[in-house]
Image: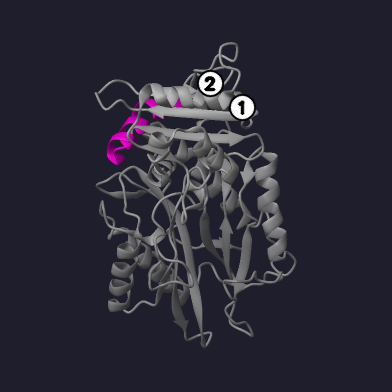
Amino acid sequence: MPAILSLEQQGKLHDSWLSERAKTVLPMLMSREGVAMWIIISREYNEDPVLKTMLPSKWMGARRTTMLVIYDDGEGSELETLACARYDVGDVFKKAWDPEKQPDQWAALREIIEERNPDRIAVNRSEDFGLADGISSWHYDKLRETLPEHLRSRLISGEKLAIGWLETRLPSEMTVYRQVMGVAHTIIAEAFSNKVITPGVTTTDDVVWYMRERANKLGLGIWFHPTVDVQRAENQELYAFSGRPDATVIMPGDLLHCDYGITYCGLNTDTQHNAYVLKPGETEAPDYLVRAFGKGMRTMDILTEQFENGRTGNELLARALVQGKDEGLRPTIYTHPIGYHGHGAGPTVGLWDQQEGVPVRGDYPLHPNTAYSIELNTKVRIDAWDKDIRMMMEEDGFWDGEKFRYIDGRQTELYLVR
């Protein structure tokens, strides 16, 4: 098990990343999208997903009404990162409101905007991307009411800024991400071992709760309830993706599968691994399951080989499905970005029930320095069982703009439970 950082260490890490991102990611995004000003407004307990990632580590959320203003004068100067607040918001956003001179916070915001006179003012409103739709209806209406007409007409969606901010990873973040993934992989390896599983006694739900408790004891978050399921030769159909598998006693000869994700250092993991429960006298998994596992790995390779800057999620999906079927596979792809959120900001590469493409979210392009959960399955006929199985796999990786790599490697062979 990799060492777990203390809360203080995690806080210092968060703040150093925030400072670095403000100096590198923000200027790149403002220039790339041609936006002069980006305004983020939230109230306590109703925080914009973007704002939550811009707050310092010692802030658990917005305070009263928190207003952040990012301004690019377009002349090559450093960005202004301002807080229309009574105090600095951490080290990045500096206080730009004096309540003694201007008691009305909204009027103070108007003055900040008027003084800079930006040609485009982005706010986090989006029809299709929930993570980019963080401004409340009331705040948006109040902002429009506050601004004079010539500035009101300059309001635009900050959708691409929000997605870009959330999806872009720093080199320093990726160094830690490998440790985060290492923790998740270690918990899964423990869960799929005789430390946890006694065949004929342990149920799939027992393993699910072990995985939750293990993370909890380490002080880590869980962003979804895990899944552990069984595929076996007799009397079992493939469960529907729209439901959860029932609790099952784990038996020799079972093919086990889990779906598990932790939150640590503000980063999320999402992993699906597979194990085989040995029958008496067996020392390795049957060849037909090893071959099926290899087909799943090949499906992952086919998808990641399609990665290229500017290709949309729908293009990646279509190319991978065509090549997979040409190679005799039966793939279903539902890959998603990952990072600050488990189902993160960026291009959606298929949904389990939308293999023809995903409108809008699937049309977003691939950018460098972004992370993805390569999630998919391929159906494989198992003659020995006289049925199809799904070889379901998921592993988190990073696209640096030139090549794709798995953050902490990937499962290359089935775990064996004795």
Q: Find out whether the residues at labels 2 and 1 contact each other: C-beta distance under 8 Å.
A: yes
- Colouring style: one colour
**Where does the image place residue 35, in percent across and percent down from the top left?**
33, 36
Q: Mark 2 sits on what residue?
A: 90
Name the residue furthest bottom: 386
How packed mark 2 is, by other alpha carbons closer than 10 Å (few <14, some 14-19, many 20 or more), is some
**Where does the image place residue 30, in percent across and percent down from the top left?**
33, 35
Q: Secondary structure at mark 1?
A: loop
Residue 99's place in the image compared with 79, above or below, is above
The range drawn in magenta is 17-35
Q: Mark 1 sits on what residue?
A: 59
* Viewer can see residue 195: yes
Of 205 and 191, the residue lying toward us = 205
Q: Main secondary structure of the magenta part?
A: helix
* Viewer can see residue 279: no
How packed mark 1 is, by other alpha carbons closer than 10 Å (few <14, some 14-19, many 20 or more), is few
Q: Secondary structure at mark 2?
A: loop
The amino acid at mark 1 is Trp
Q: Is residue 368 left or right of residue 106?
A: left
Residue at point 40%, 47% (across, down): 371
Residue 21, label in figure: none
Quadrant where the C terminus sits is bottom right
Residue at point 41%, 72% (across, down): 355
